[in-house]
Image (cartoon, coloured by chain):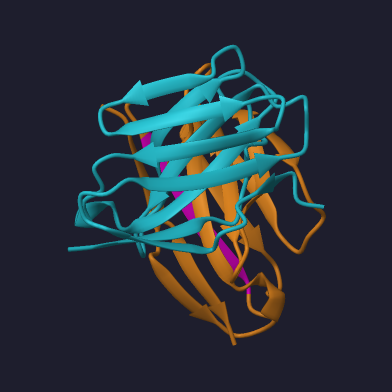
Amino acid sequence: DQQVKQNSPSLSVQEGRISILNCDYTNSMFDYFLWYKKYPAEGPTFLISISSIKDKNEDGRFTVFLNKSAKHLSLHIVPSQPGDSAVYFCAASSNYGGSQGNLIFGKGTKLSVKP
Amino acid sequence: SQTIHQWPATLVQPVGSPLSLECTVEGTSNPNLYWYRQAAGRGLQLLFYSVGIGQISSEVPQNLSASRPQDRQFILSSKKLLLSDSGFYLCAWGIYNSPLHFGNGTRLTVT
């Protein structure tokens, strides 16, 4: 059973508008959540993270929201740019910092930002 | 700054042949090292991780093995590849309280 779910395999957004990528998790022990961005033929690159003690973390155009009661997090990109077109992976861990292994990844959402 | 090198970028191997993928990290000491695999249409699955030389933890039973002969070197191997071993293999490194950093991956096709 998937512990981290990204139910939308793809999302298309107009340049300048908001992109909202969603992620749901089932394991209540997860206490650290990350978003990674992946271009074709490259490894994922870390984008933004949030610990379970917060409900929002912002970094420039990227904001991650965490709703622990709903076991849901989302990534907002405002404004969206064509260069944001990539596959976005949600990941979760039960070890703070996510660096002790066992980052559990979702299947990813392919974002396309149209000019 | 830290960098991670992974090679080769692509590999086509026949069923039953051996495999060796290598990953090295520069600019950091005693990192945790990881091998992930992304099969077609699936998320990233953790295969192995290592917290030190000679220390390997396996997350899923499989046809693969890993070794860490040096502090910043991580090797993924197989004695006999299966068709189901095809996928995108990613090496990553991390230290406590920081996100993982991934290499550019190896696209393995077993024919």
Residue, x 43% and y 46% (percent of image)?
Answer: A20
Q: Is B24 colored magenta in this rendering? A: yes
Q: Which chain is cyan?
A: A
The answer to which of B108 and A20 lies nearer the viewer is A20
Residue, x 41% and y 71% (percent of image)?
Answer: B10
Which image quadrant: the C terminus of chain B?
Answer: bottom right
Q: Quadrant of residue B40?
A: bottom right
The answer to which of B83 and A83 lies nearer the viewer is A83
Which image quadrant: the N terminus of chain B?
Answer: top left
Residue B59 rendering spot, x and y as whole percentages: 76, 44
The answer to which of B2 and B16 lies nearer the viewer is B2
Residue A112 shows up from this direction: yes
Rendered colour, chain B: orange
B58 sits left or right of A13 in the view: right
Pick out the residue farthest to the left.
A115
Residue B81 rendering spot, x and y as whole percentages: 68, 74
The main secondary structure of the magenta stretch is: strand
Residue A1 rendering spot, x and y as whole percentages: 82, 52
In the rendered image, the vertical position of residue B35 relative to residue A100, given as above or below = below
Residue B29 shows up from this direction: no
In the rendered image, the vertical position of residue A71 relative to residue A77, given as above or below = above
A87 sits left or right of A115 in the view: right
Magenta span of residues: B18-25
Residue A25 rendering spot, x and y as whole percentages: 70, 39
Residue, x 31% and y 30% (percent of image)?
Answer: B2
